[in-house]
Amino acid sequence: MTNTTLNWERFFTVRLSKWAWCVGLLLAPLIYSGSKIYQNHYKSNYFGVERHDLVTFVSHVEYELYHVIIPITKYAVPALLILLSLLHLLLVVSQKQHAQLPREPKKYSRIENINGSILERVVGDYFREQGFTVKPWQANFDSVCDLVVEKNGAQYLVTYDYWRTDSINFANVLDLFVEVLSNNMSGAYIVTSSQFTEAANAFLSTKPIDIISGTSLRSFLRSSKKYRGNLRNRNAG
């Protein structure tokens, strides 16, 4: 299917549907005027003529039009068109106002669905926006860290290894802190959409380890034109 065909389909299905109320308002006076013109035509040809005096099929049809159909098309149809047009106009205005409300990207309505290379890119850009330089963390295979970020001469380890775990316990945060100490880092960041156990929270409260929650990452995605435009329709998990 060509782009031209798609554009025409979009025009008829989207554009015209938004202006259906206007078409209804235009048709209402036209139908009323047409009915009135026909009434005047009938009166000029059949004024004073009763039904039993009509002899031709055409005259019988015109009689029925004048006495039955025309009263409906003259008043009821225009009134119905106007009513439907006003209701449709209210619907269009309501949809437009709703569309202008701030909305998070569809793909990140469940932020925990992001993973893999997309998660790595999002986290890296999150720190770059905060003024950090970002590099992959080159460590041994059992390291829980993924990135190393630097700002004002201080280096921090970043892990999103626990992004979608059921919960983060004391052993998890202890492993991270040991890695911070063994590599002479200033601290660490845990990027996660998971919850912490009480013991893990108590340990973190005394250590230079900060948490970047799914809410923080969602706020970043909402404010980022890059991700709102380019990643919305990608399969993130």
Image: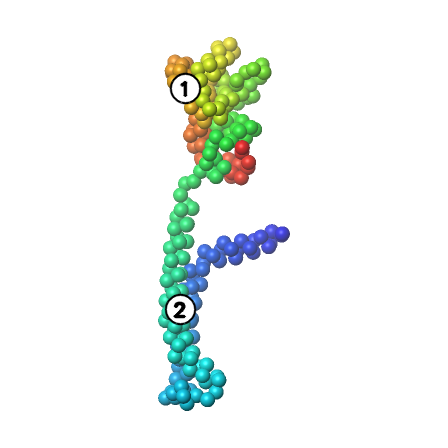
Image coordinates of residue 122 in percent, x first then y, are 51, 29
Query: In screen coordinates, is 90 left or right of 184?
Result: left
Q: Which mark is residue 77?
A: 2
Q: Residue at x 49, y 58 (%)?
A: 16
Q: Residue at x 40, y 72 (%)?
A: 73
Question: Is residue 205 positioned above or below 39 on the image?
Answer: above
Quadrant in the rendering for residue 169: top left
Quadrant in the rendering for residue 88: bottom left
Q: Residue at x 45, y 60 (%)?
A: 20
Q: Quadrant of the C terminus?
A: top right
Q: Label 1: few (<14), some or many (≥20) within 10 Å?
A: few
- Say if residue 212 shows up in the picture: no
Image coordinates of residue 171 in percent, x first then y, are 46, 14
Sequence-wise, the earlier of marks 2 and 1 is: 2
Image coordinates of residue 92 in percent, x first then y, are 41, 53
| Amino acid on which the number 2 mark rests in the picture | Val
Residue holding disc 1: 197
Number of numbered discs: 2
Residue situated in front as seen by the camera: 124 or 109: 109
As helix, strand or loop, the secondary structure at mark 2 comes to helix
Q: Nearer the viewer, mark 2 or mark 1?
A: 1
Question: Is residue 70 positioned above or below 136 on the image?
Answer: below
Q: Residue furthest top?
A: 182
Residue situated in front as seen by the camera: 184 or 115: 115
